[in-house]
Amino acid sequence: MRAVVLNGCCKAEDLQVTRIPVPEVRKGWVLVKIHAAGLNHSEAILRMYEADNDYINTPVVPGIECVGEIADASDSGFKNGDRVMALMGGMGRSFNGSYAEYALLPSKNVFRVDSTLDWLSLAAIPETYYTAYGSLTECLLLTAGDTLLVRGATSTVGQAAIQLAKALGATVIGACRHDSSFDRLKEIGADYCVIDDGHISEQPLPIRPNKLLELVGPKTLRDSLQTASKPGYVCNTGILGNQFTVEHFDPIKYIPNGVFLTGFFSNYPTQTAVSSMMELIIKGGIRPLYNSVFTLDEIAEAHKLLEFGGAGGKIILKMN
């Protein structure tokens, strides 16, 4: 089969397609014929910085998510031909991932999807929409009548969160750095938009949010905690600000009274969560968002765009 194999850290232009054997099925794993896969910044980080570390099982086929159909169900409860998505759990790091025509994956990381969406649209969903959905439902407990502020709203997860939150019946405020993005955010469902100058808590907002999705991360987390109304919830999911920790964190002084801080970790999806997410996407008439599509042979160009930005949304890799 055709695949991209990473032997260590390298430049984007060094990526190329090679041929490796189709994996042999074993107990507890299923063989998935991949139709398309979403690309993620973590895969660029793997290629640039992590692949030489001992905890990465190189040589490895990168890719933390994919959509396709079951080619060999092995001893699982799947049937050959089932439409599925797969994500996380060590995929593309501890074992071969989605930059290939086939992937042998643990059955616990593969989820049946009941949808007639085309493969490219379906490929935009797994990691991006699951991260947004889990943040909203498991961490923020978002319901109709809530007001949600999405910080980092123009990111792929931010845009997905806006769509999902509107489908859940919430009022949504999109926060971003440039007002040139306002029309786009309102087009996908934002009721209001504000400029993120790092001090949203000091702005006269059109309405004060009781729920806040923090995608910029520790860099603006304290301001987000001060922005939420009381009682309020703040979920830190992203690290778009490239600051990974809060120095000298004192939870008593850092977290305001009456505001609850949580965080979402997407590494352990379940079939129940994936099915609930897909049901919301279908019932809400949500169109999964993606901006760029590359073939497997164009992996170097795709990774250049992934590394340096400019895609303006999700990048999809198609296998045929």
Image (cartoon, rainbow, N blue to C red):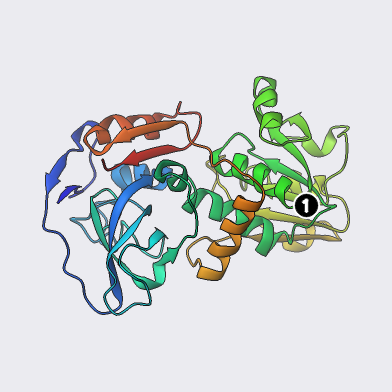
Residue 79 vertical placement versus 200 (above, below): below
- State the residue position of label 1: 211
210 to 252, vertically: above or below: above
Give 206 or 65, whichever is nearer the viewer.
Answer: 65
Residue located 32% across and 33% down the image: 294
Left or right, 230 with respect to 200, comes to right
Give residue 47's position: percent from left, percent from top. 29, 44
The residue drawn where x is 61% and y is 44% is 286
Amino acid type shown at disc 1: Lys
Which quarter of the picture shows residue 33?
A: bottom left
Q: Identify the residue at image location x=78%, y=36%.
A: 200
**Quadrant position of residue 57:** bottom left
Q: Is residue 305 left or right of residue 186?
A: left
What percent of the width, then of the height, locates residue 210?
83, 51
Residues packed near mark 1 inside 10 Å, few (<14), some (14 to 19) or many (20 plus)? many
User: Residue 14 or 48: which is nearer the viewer?
Assistant: 14
| Image coords of residue 265 (percent x, y) | 54, 61
Report if residue 246 is visible in the image.
Answer: no
Helix, strand or loop at label 1? It is strand
Residue nearer the viewer, 264 or 19: 19
Residue 192: image x %, image y %? 79, 33
